[in-house]
Image (cartoon, helix red, strand yellow):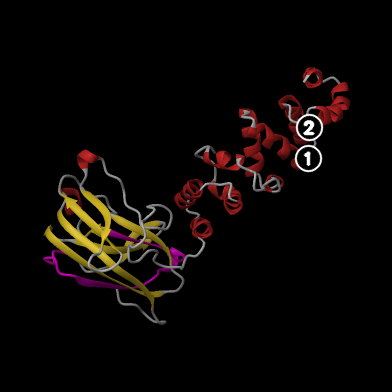
Amino acid sequence: MAYARLLYALWKKQDPLAQDMLRHAMTLAPNDSRVLIILAADGLAKEDWPLASRALIRLVERGNPDARKYLLELMLNPATQGAVLGQLDHNAYWLDAMLATAPPKTPPVLLQQFVSEGHALGVVKTQTVLNMVDKLKASGDWMDAYTLWVALRQQVDSGLHNPGFDQRSLRRGFDWEWPQQAANKQGMRITQVPASPRAGSMLELELTARGSLPVSLIGQTMLVLGENFKLEGRYMSDRMRSKEGLSWVLRCAAGGDRWAQSEPLKDTQRQWQGFEIRFKVPPECFGMVRLQLEASALWEARAGMSGVMYFDDFKLTPLGIGPAND
């Protein structure tokens, strides 16, 4: 410790003797923060990115805030991020904290490889991966987001995920999503309930009429490989007070107008009915589309609705080449 303290004092004074002492300090006190600071600075100055990465990582593990800033710069720079990736192993638990605390304006696509490799090594938490998937979606990096989603979920088929609502929705990524409304202005409540007497679960949507409805009551972003598809499903409603009803609609994942929709879904007096949408994916969607449930009329979404609606047994089927019926 005394040797490291002396080395650091000489280094701060830019004494040439510090460089000669550094080699011995690396043997005598390899984990001393002062020695690591000098190693990191030396690596950055000489553009020895592996040396700088190793030293900065060890400083980050010791809670050094300045080291976090410099390490993140190396992670974000395409010319240096390979050196940091080379430090990843099954003990790289520092990575999850680095990713979770990255500034909000950090381009998520630049950190995608760290998330993928870190999760594969078991050192990046599922929540951190989901956060990165959502950031990539928000930044419009749809394919990068989907690639990371597949890495997280292991086996994912393109198209509609969890079509029967039998799995508990993560409400993140490329699963079913719905907004959380304030309790005093809750115009709807969504839950997954048993489909008894049938096996599995179904989706229950309760409209309370106590507040306006969001544009998307529930939705899912999908990767659809092909042009023509048929979406079908079943629904049942009870005590629906609505003139125009609800509709399942399709938009490009990046936004824009709806280009396909179901017939309005209204009260069925607790009888199950089916709906169907045949659609052709517009080229401008680049295979990424958004399926979501919306009020058929904007004015009615603002006014609010009441009643209960259930959904189950969705199915997305590719169709042959040719025009699809809207």
Please say if the residues under marks 1 and 2 sit with CB atoms less than 8 Å apart.
yes
Residue 175 image point, x, y percent: 39, 58
Neighbour tally class for label 1: few under 14, some 14-19, many 20 plus, Cα within 10 Å: some
Q: Residue flagged by tag 2: what amino acid is it?
A: Asp
Residue 19 image point, x, y percent: 86, 27
For image coordinates 38% across by 79% down, the residue present is 319
Residue 188 image point, x, y percent: 22, 50
Q: Which of 32 and 57 is in front in this view?
A: 32
For image coordinates 19% across by 60% down, the residue present is 309
Residue 267 image point, x, y percent: 13, 64
Q: Residue flagged by tag 1: what amino acid is it?
A: Asp
Specify the quadrant that holds the C terminus.
bottom left
Disc 1 secondary structure class = loop
Residue 265 visible, this angle: no
Residue 204 visible, this angle: yes
User: Marks 1 and 2, how far apart in space?
Assistant: 8 Å
Give the residues in magenta. 266-293
> Is residue 189 in the magenta section?
no
Q: Which of 176 and 61 is in front in this view?
A: 61
Disc 2 secondary structure class = helix
Judged left or right of residue 88, residue 276 is: left
Judged left or right of residue 84, residue 124 is: left
Q: Quick check: 5 above or below 106?
A: above
Q: Nearer the viewer, residue 102 or 308?
A: 308
Q: Disc 1 or 2, which lies upstream in sequence? A: 2
Residue 42's label in the rendered image is 2
Give the residue at mark 1. Answer: 48
